[in-house]
Image (cartoon, rainbow, N blue to C red):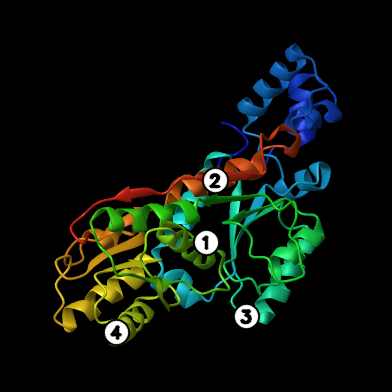
């Protein structure tokens, strides 16, 4: 019966050393992954560890290695947005947790929706409780990206970091999808369908994705002879409905809408149905993200698929790769047009 059995004393480093016939320091080096032990000695120590059921003391080990094997996943958004409205967050949390577990790392989920929580999280990271940070921050007035950079903790951002005027988050690694190109492709499809009064429901101007997708909309229309018509939402379903009603009041002849987020597109579809407009006969609609609900709208939503899962996997790999071994600190993935019945 090994030392991990119920009621028996936990085996010590000294006991493992005695079983293997080596010094305590040698066992410590093997357990902590040092490369200064010969293969034959390493095999003897590992065999003794297995036979005795030795489990390293994680607290003591972290003092030796200066590592916690914990990664902070910081969502710098209010909890209602993170877990009630936008399914992107759940997909990213689920994928990051799975990837970190596979790498034998512990994920620490931190929500930074208030100024007080920002300060608390900054103190937590500064205290050395985590080896790295995966940051989901959508708003350019968020102070956390700059704070994490100043702390010198390894960090990767989900999406290109928002940059307030006068500041530069130079050097912050990030993973994103090509929002400009994706929006351009979405609007390009509407043009190919022969639509000539194409409006957009843009995201907020203080969010990188909002600005980039609006840029893609304008790029697609440039030289087409189609006049831009812009309403703004905040990536929520309600704001999409409000923006759509405003567009119909101001531009009753519009025959297509590109919504910069699927939730806004869902709101727009409802507003169009309430106004008596048929989709896509009267007004074609294309969204962005390809959330699960896009398949079940009436009609099913044509949209740009943002690769949430692939981006989350890439973030973990980027964070866990030594900076000197990275091909780049920036990973840009492509969005894909998913054609359904709304356009």
Q: Which mark is residue 212?
A: 1
Q: CA distance from mark 1 to mark 3?
A: 26 Å
Judged from the image, the secondary structure of the residue bearing numbered disc 4 is helix
User: Which of 301/28 is in front?
Assistant: 301
Q: Position of residue 91 (x, y in %)?
A: 42, 56
Relative horizontal placement of residue 231, taking residue 315 as reference (left or right)? left
Judged from the image, the secondary structure of the residue bearing numbered disc 2 is strand
**Dot placed on the residue nearer the N-terminal end, 1 or 3:** 3
User: Which of 238/63 is in front?
Assistant: 238
Q: Which mark is residue 114?
A: 3
**Dot placed on the residue nearer the N-terminal end, 4 or 3:** 3
Specify few, some or many for label 3: CA neighbours under 10 Å numbering under 14, 14-19, or 20 or more. few
Q: Which residue is mark 4?
A: 245
Specify few, some or many for label 4: CA neighbours under 10 Å numbering under 14, 14-19, or 20 or more. many
**Dot placed on the residue nearer the N-terminal end, 4 or 2:** 4
Image quadrant in which you'd find residue 246:
bottom left
Image quadrant in which you'd find residue 44:
top right
């Amino acid at each position: 019966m090994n030392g991990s059995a119920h009621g028996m004393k936990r085996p010590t480093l000294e006991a493992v050393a005695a079983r293997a016939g080596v010094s305590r320091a040698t066992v410590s080096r093997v357990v902590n992954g040092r490369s200064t032990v010969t293969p034959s000695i390493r095999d003897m120590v590992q065999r003794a560890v297995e036979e005795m059921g030795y489990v390293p003391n994680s607290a003591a080990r972290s003092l030796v290695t200066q590592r916690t094997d914990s990664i902070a996943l910081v969502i710098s958004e209010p909890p209602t947005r993170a877990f009630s409205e936008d399914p992107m967050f759940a997909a990213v949390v689920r994928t990051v947790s799975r990837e970190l577990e596979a790498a034998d790392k512990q994920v620490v989920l931190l929500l930074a929706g208030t100024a007080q929580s920002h300060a608390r999280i900054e103190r937590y990271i500064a205290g050395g409780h985590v080896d790295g940070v995966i940051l989901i921050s959508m708003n350019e007035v968020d102070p956390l990206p700059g704070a994490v950079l100043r702390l010198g903790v390894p960090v990767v951002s989900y999406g290109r970091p928002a940059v307030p005027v006068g500041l530069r988050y130079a050097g912050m690694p990030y993973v994103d999808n090509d929002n400009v190109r994706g929006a351009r492709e979405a609007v390009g499809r509407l043009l190919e369908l022969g639509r000539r009064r194409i409006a957009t429901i843009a995201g907020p101007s203080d969010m990188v994705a909002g600005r980039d997708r609006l840029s893609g909309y304008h790029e697609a229309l440039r030289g087409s002879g189609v006049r831009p018509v812009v309403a703004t939402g905040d990536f929520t379903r309600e704001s999409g409905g409000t923006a759509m009603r405003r567009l119909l009041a101001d531009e009753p002849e519009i025959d297509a809408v590109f919504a910069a987020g699927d939730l806004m597109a869902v709101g727009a579809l409802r507003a169009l149905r309430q106004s008596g407009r048929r989709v896509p006969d009267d007004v074609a609609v294309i969204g962005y993200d390809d959330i699960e609900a896009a398949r079940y709208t009436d009609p099913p939503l044509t949209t740009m698929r943002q690769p949430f899962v692939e981006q989350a996997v890439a973030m973990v790999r980027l964070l866990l790769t030594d900076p000197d071994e990275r091909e780049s600190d920036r990973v840009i993935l492509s969005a894909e047009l998913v054609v359904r019945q709304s356009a």
